[in-house]
Amino acid sequence: MCHTGWVPGYSTTAPEPDQVDYVSLAPGIAGPPWIKLHVEDIDGYDLEARIVATARTKDRTGRYEIEKLCVLRRPDGPALSSDQLRKVAVAGLVRGAVARWWRSVKVDQETGELSMEDSRLSDEIVAKLKSAGPSDPETQAWVARTYRLALILNEPPTAAVEKALGMPRSTVSTWIAAARRSGALSPSEGRGKAVG
């Protein structure tokens, strides 16, 4: 399947969950083993990358790393130099690619079967979570998922929850603490900490 996106000429390709085993990146979150990224005409260059998943371990959240990167100068683009290469925002493009492909993983308590769904926060879900408050199990699960996704994307996790829920940092900190107390997010999860 192919996703196009927020940058003109930007597309990603990756296998769907029914085509290949997805990689466990954090509790309840999985992603494809690889993603191909293609961007046309970014600062006078075309960019192609193969991004591969590294599964989570006991001590670290999973992540994506660039395995291969190809930068091609367009006919009207500037000469390829180290100064020009530093201007290409590769990290942001990779984060954008990964952000489109993750899936929520659920385990059926009776059969033990895994299922995956593409669950994203919407304005409707955010309103429901705000109404339910930080002690609601669904709210805690969403806070934990958003926090973990930020870790996978190498973004500040508290700021990511703040942005996703549209709340001030002090409120978000209280909600993250509630998710930790309930066990939805382990006390050890965070930058430089073990995965729960």
Image (cartoon, grey):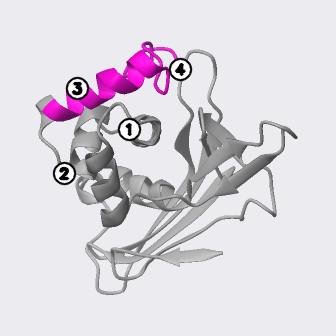
List x then y, in percent, for residue 31.
62, 50
Within 10 Å of disc 1 (Cα), the crowding (few <14, some 14-19, many 20+) is many
Magenta span of residues:
171-194
Lower sequence index among marks 4 and 1 = 1
Q: Name the residue under label 1.
A: 143
Q: Quadrant of the C terminus?
A: top right
Q: Secondary structure beneath disc 1?
A: helix
Q: Name the residue under label 3.
A: 174
List x then y, in percent, for residue 22.
72, 49
112 relative position to 157: left or right: right
List x then y, in percent, for residue 181.
40, 16
User: At label 2, which amino acid type do we have?
Assistant: Gly
Which mark lies nearer to you, 4 or 2?
Answer: 2
Q: Name the residue under label 2.
A: 166
**Who is closer to the viewer here, 52 or 109?**
109
List x then y, in percent, for residue 51.
57, 52
The answer for how far apart the CA atoms under marks 2 and 1 are is 12 Å
Q: What residue lies at 27% left-to-right and 49% top-to-bottom? A: 131
Is mark 4 in CB contact (under 8 Å) with mark 1? no
Q: Mark 4 points at which residue?
A: 195
